[in-house]
Structure formats: structure tokens, C-alpha cells
Image: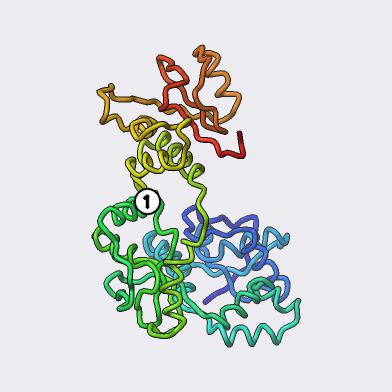
Amino acid sequence: MNTEKVKIDELKFDPDNVRKHDDNSIKAIANSLSAFGQRKPIVIDQTNTVIAGNGTLKAGIYLGLKELDCVRVPDDWSKEKIKAFAIADNKTHDLSEFDNELLLNTLQDLNEFEIEVTGFEADELEDLMMFKKNPFKTIKIDINELKPHSKNYQEHPEDQLEHIINSINTHGFYRNIVIAKDFTILAGHGVVEAVKKMGTIKRVPVIKLDIESDSVQALKVLTSDNEISQLAQVNDKALTNLLKEILELDESILGTGYNEDQLSALAYTSTTKNEIGNKQDADDWVGIFEHEQRPEIFSVVVKFESEADRVKFVEEKGIENFHNQRGNVWSTYYPFRDKDDVSNLYLVDDDEN
């Protein structure tokens, strides 16, 4: 392997580099270069485009270096082989993992300066100490390898699974499934059932705890995931208004855990008779018109980049009246409806009156 020094201003970043470097990454590489010098050459092609080492090039520019040690790929490498090498160079770093306990012990033997040049920060050292106390791994695993816990006491009806499926399709997995060391599910049974029903996702993100599935810790996770959230106090009016706003913006509340009938019932039970007098009024407020023969409601949603654009639009279209002006959301009818139409009611907490 022949190493050559190439001037930094002659090197070019790879426009197809799949590895992104944020400011913290560049700072860590720069600290390493300052402390130890360049101990690994970057890899370039015959046009001086960097194939492996784009982060080192960025750090070198940041430090004001004039040149870097480089190694060129062989002349006979095809474009496809060069791209494959670039991806492999990035991916192979991810295939290994730290022995966290040994890493923590080693870092604790270093002084503050020495820790900084390793790329680790003080917060990460605290994370390692916490991990040593409560170890877990976040991984992706084949859905068929997960096993329901024999003591799981919750069942998941079809309507709940439909909400979970809608949420996954819309937002992805924003909560990991939690499993024990033998792949037994401790939290997320409903998510696993929903994914299996979808039939399109093979691997799911999980947090793997280093505990036995029949241990006291595991049983506490199993129950706490279901029960602790129920200790929260719900402001029914605030929830009702939030669901109505979602319904107005998206024309559906599927994925929230509620449907339109449940929202109507929630609105009716969380208001006074002066606000919503009966169940039919609640249905009308939600937009359920089974009790009366009313025409279908159509809507157009117009979004603006600024408040000034919205005001200009309203003035140009001659819109003078709005039923709701809540924060960023304004709504009205065309032709305009009287304000006493219950479908335009916005619920207000008693302490706001």
C-alpha cells in the first residue's frame, strides 16, 4: 500500500457519501488529529475524490491543515466496486460493539483531556455508568422471534389494532417494544400483534433488557407499562378539543385511540347543557349527521408560510367572519353559518370563563 501526501485543496468530497458528519463528529475527529496526528490515511480515487475519510477531510479543513496522507484505489476498480467499498468502509464500523463494562473501566482511568480526545464526552460517561447499573440494548429483531409473556393480562381487540396499525403507517415506531433476554415481550404486545396482522414488516425495533422473563423486574415492567399511564389525570375538555382539531385538520382521528362516536360521547359527558344540550348536538358538533338529513360537508385546507400571507389571503378573499381562531388554525364556513350552530362550538374550561 503506497501512501502519498495530497494537498487538501486538491481533494474533493464524495457527493454520494452515505455517512453524514455533524459538528460533534467533526470536532471529535479534529481533537483526535490534534492529539495523535493522522494515523490512518484516507482513501481516494484517481480524480482525488475521497472514497473513505470524508470526515477526516472536513476535520482537516477545520484545523487548517495543508495536506493529508492518502491511499489511492487500484486503477482497475470499476465505479460500482468503488461505491461498494465506500459503503463497506462505513458499515463495517457498525458491525462491532463495545464491551461497555471494559470501556467504562478504561475511560475512568483517563484524565479529562484524554477522555475528550477519544471522542467520548462526560455525558456519555454518565450514560455508561447508568448502563452498567441497568444494562439494555436497542436492536432490530425478526418479529417471529418474539414471544408473548405467559402472564400478560391484556387483550387487544380489533379496533385497537387498527389504531396501532394506522399509527405505525403514519409515524413509524416511536416506542420500542421491550423484551427480556430470552426475547419474551414485556411491553408492546399490542404492537407485535398489529405488526403481525399487517404482514409487511419483518423486523421491529426492541429494547432488550438483561433480565430473565420470570424475574421480579420483568413482571414489574409488564405491569408498569400498562398501569402507570392510567395514573395520569385527563382534562376531558382539553382532550375533546384536541381530537376535534385533529378531525378538522385530517378528517380522521384513526390512530389516536378514539373514533368519531367516542369523541361525540366524550364531548357530551364533558360539557354542560349550555354548551352541548344532548347527544344529537354532540354528534352534530363532531360532524356525525345520522340524526338529520344534512348535505355532505366538503372542505379545502389552505396552509401559509407566514401570518402575513394568511392575513393577505383573508383580505383578498373578503373573509370577515370566523367561527374558530385558535392559534394557527382559523376555520369558517362558506356560505357563513350562524355562530349558534352547535357544530362550531369550542369547549372552554370553567377556569377560562
Where's residue 175, x and y in %? 44, 62
Label 1 secondary element: loop
In this rendering, the count of numbered labels is 1
| Above or below 327: residue 204 | below
| Above or below 334: residue 46 | below
* Label 1 crowd (10 A; few <14 / some 14-19 / many >=20): some
Q: Quadrant of residue 120?
A: bottom right
Quadrant where the C terminus is found in the figure: top right
Where's residue 244, x and y in %? 43, 37
Query: How was this image coloured?
Result: rainbow
Q: Quadrant of residue 56?
A: bottom right
| Residue at 35 percent of width and 35 percent of height | 279
Most extreme residue toward the front, as rendered?
273
Where's residue 150, x and y in %? 30, 78
**Camera-side residue of 101 and 268:** 268
Left or right side of 111 for 309? left
Left or right side of 240 for 352? right
The residue type indicated by label 1 comes to Gly
| Above or below 53: residue 277 | above
| Residue at 72 percent of width and 62 percent of height | 63
**Camera-side residue of 349 and 180:** 349
| Residue at 47 percent of width and 26 percent of height | 331
Where's residue 92, x and y in %? 45, 73
| Above or below 17: residue 346 | above
- Pointer 1 residue: 257
**Camera-side residue of 146 and 88:** 146
